[in-house]
Amino acid sequence: MSMTVLLALLLVVAAPARAQDVVVVLGSDLAPYREAYEGFVTAFGEPVELLPLGGKPPKGARVVVAFGGKAALQRYPTGVTLVYGLAPGVRAEREPGEARAVKIPMEPAPAALLGRLGALQPGLKRLAVLWASKGGEESVARLVQDGSARGVEVLSERLESADDLPAALRRLRGKADALWLPPDPLLINARNFDIIKRYAYDNDVPFYVPTEALAEKGAAAAVSVGYSDAGRAAAAAARAVRTGKPPPADVFAGARVSVNRSAAAECGLVLPAVALKGVDKVYP
């Protein structure tokens, strides 16, 4: 357990009389969820109760912050606002009359994503997006709209299943300047990543991914949301609900950029020197 989490728990124990109007639920004890929780605690700056998965929020709770798909899809009391993150491909639906749900997406805001990609690839005019999860419909629609405003045609390629990937790539041959792979759990696996990577290398089409780990494994670059960044965005959303200023249905965290120089070269991408100055991590 990190010092940040330990301090937060000690604060909760030290102040039992204080109503816990904001509580946190983790989908598991995996490192990404703990990192998001630490980011939340640091940014929120107040004691927060950490509930076990399936735990009932205390009386007086106004906001439940859930990290992970299992935590996001639990049922919570009608009047409690749900703020959830680290749940790619998930859209938590609430019944009519219930308090709203606010998602912290694991991809950057469309404008931020397109801006980062444009800096890495100034000639980008046609961006293909491969996706499969139902929860990706809204984010792809926003990307199409923002792309149109920026002069970038976004080609939405939805797959009915992961097995459709080779056929989708054949349809895209010669039509796209780059590929974007959003954080889609139905699409991203080791086999599909290798298929996309081989297609990108063979056809000189840069492909961009939503995590640093995938950039390290051979994508040209990643435009990602860090786990602690998602936690900080969730803290901002929780504070907004508490002050009576409900945030929008999606609250985006800041974007990090990671570049893989050798993979970019394999994809035929010449990275501008000025763009490299603004990246967070560079793999050789």
Image: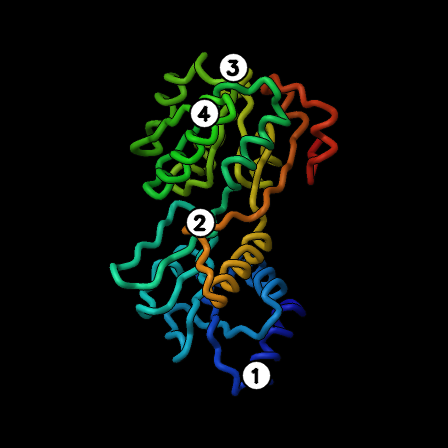
- Classify the position of the N terminus by image quarter: bottom right
**Residue that extends furthest to the bottom in the rendered view of this protein:** 17
Q: Which residue is mark 4?
A: 148
**In the displayed structure, does residue 225 sit left or right of residue 174?**
right
Q: Which residue is located at x 45 percent, y 65 percent?
A: 244
Up-down: is 230 above or below 159? below
Up-down: is 96 above or below 155? below
Q: Looking at the image, is mark 4 or mark 3 earlier in the sequence?
A: 4
Q: CA distance from mark 3 to mark 1?
A: 58 Å
Residue type at tag 3: Asn
Residue type at tag 4: Ser
Q: What kind of element bears circle 1?
A: helix
Q: Which residue is located at x 69 percent, y 36 percent?
A: 279
Q: Looking at the image, is mark 4 or mark 1 earlier in the sequence?
A: 1
Task: Report the disc number at residue 250.
Answer: 2
- Classify the position of the C terminus by image quarter: top right
Q: Which residue is mark 3?
A: 203
Expressed as whole percent of the image width and height from the top left, the position of residue 30 reads: 52, 59
**Residue that extends furthest to the top in the rendered view of this protein:** 174
Tag 4 and tag 3, C-beta contact below 8 Å: no
Q: CA distance from mark 3 to mark 2?
A: 35 Å
Expressed as whole percent of the image width and height from the top left, the position of residue 119 reads: 63, 27
- The quarter of the displayed image where residue 264 is located: top right
